Amino acid sequence: MNEAFLTQLLQAVPLPSVLIGRGERILAANAAGLELLGPGIVGRHFLTAIRHPAVLDAIEACLRDGQLRKTRHLTSQSGRDLTFDVTASRIDLGDGHGVLVCFDDISPVEQAGQMRRDFVANVSHELRTPLTALMGFIETMQGPARNDIPAQQRFLEIMQQEAQRMERLVRDLLSLSRVEADERVRPTSFVDIAAIATSVLQSLAPLAKENEVTFVQDGPTEGMGVPGDEDQLRQVLTNLVENAIKYGGRGKAVTVSLTPIEKLKGTDGPGIEISVADQGPGIDQIHLPRLTERFYRIDSHRSREMGGTGLGLAIVKHIVTRHRGRLRIDSAPGQGSRFIISLPR
Ligand SMILES: Nc1ncnc2c1ncn2[C@@H]1O[C@H](COP(=O)(O)OP(=O)(O)OP(=O)(O)O)[C@@H](O)[C@H]1O
Ligand SMILES: [Mg+2]
């Protein structure tokens, strides 16, 4: 059969594909196929052109009995792991038989599956720790500490903390999934972000006092309208200020500043920048890109002691994205941390 025609036909196939023809040589390949298997494979024997044992087995088997074969092919391209579903099917070429080999890139599906498995593992792990503690205390109270009222009081207090921890985790997970669900829906209301910041600082004043942290508020305290969802923006500021208090250290200051911006980067429209800065130990560069991942904690032991679940910044990131805004983190060890959110007005 006409080789140019076959090449044209393969070009129209939306998957990396090669056709093996007479003499078991590569008769044609499309551009994606050449990119995957290397240029210059056309004309070569398939055994020297395709070097993946599972794929070779499938082709050989298909050549032998004409039955369709499927196999999985793992490779890596520029540092990325790729997974392909490969099919080898026999084709009648008129002057003999050929085998069409198609590579279907299923890496995104595999990745999503891996993310789901990681997520379930993380959630289970986070829930199991407090649950194990609760079960331990229940057992102790039923057995050795059956009549020890003072000990029971102490245990109940710890059990309450552990139960609260589980409750917080479930609440954060629900809030994360709600935010994710409407991430593509633009907020319809108009809210005063300065007033929200003022009110968040008021509600967190007791926590600040407990940690001997002083608040500094820079810029206007009201009258800064942005299109936004009040509850969600309140949550963003709460999470950031809570972190600044928790990780900033005792006796330090937490500064919340609001700055109107004439031309926001990326949109060129007007916007507003809200920054939450602390005087804490700062964050090493290597952690910055991963900080907004779910369950990512720099010092998971310390964070957990403080009741952290590692979902706070993931929620912030999703809410900011929904508002078409950006989150930047400026930090270096010993320099404190500054979380800056820019929102379009
Ligand atoms: N201001 C900050 N200074 C230093 N480290 C911070 C700061 N904010 C966050 N981090 C680090 O980033 C991690 C993730 O923060 P995130 O708010 O997502 O989770 P968390 O505070 O541990 O738990 P949660 O907010 O769900 O209760 C924290 O565990 C902490 O290690
Ligand atoms: Mg937090």
Image (spheres, rainbow, N blue to C red):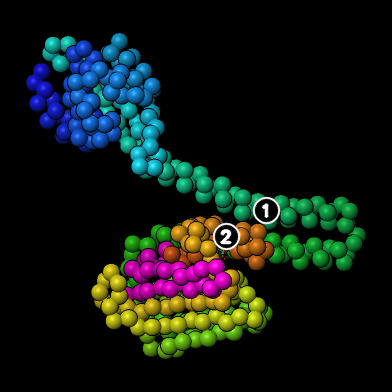
Q: Residues within 10 Å of mark 2 (few under 14, many from 20)?
A: some
Give the residues in magenta: 318-345
Q: Quadrant of the N terminus?
A: top left
x, y percent for residue 115: 47, 47
Task: Answer with the quarter of the image where residue 185 lies.
Answer: bottom left
x, y percent for residue 226: 35, 79
Task: Answer with the quarter of the image where residue 301 lies.
Answer: bottom right
Answer left or right for 178 relative to 280: left
Q: Determine which residue is flagged by label 2.
A: 298
Q: Is residue 65 above or below residue 14?
A: above
Amino acid bearing label 1: Thr
The tag on residue 176 is none
Amino acid bearing label 2: Ile
Q: Is residue 44 above or below residue 242?
A: above
Task: Judge: label 2 CB < 8 Å from ligand 1.
Answer: yes
Q: Determine which residue is flagged by label 1.
A: 129
Name the one closer to the observer, 342 or 226.
Answer: 342
Look at the image and tell me whether residue 299 can be seen: yes
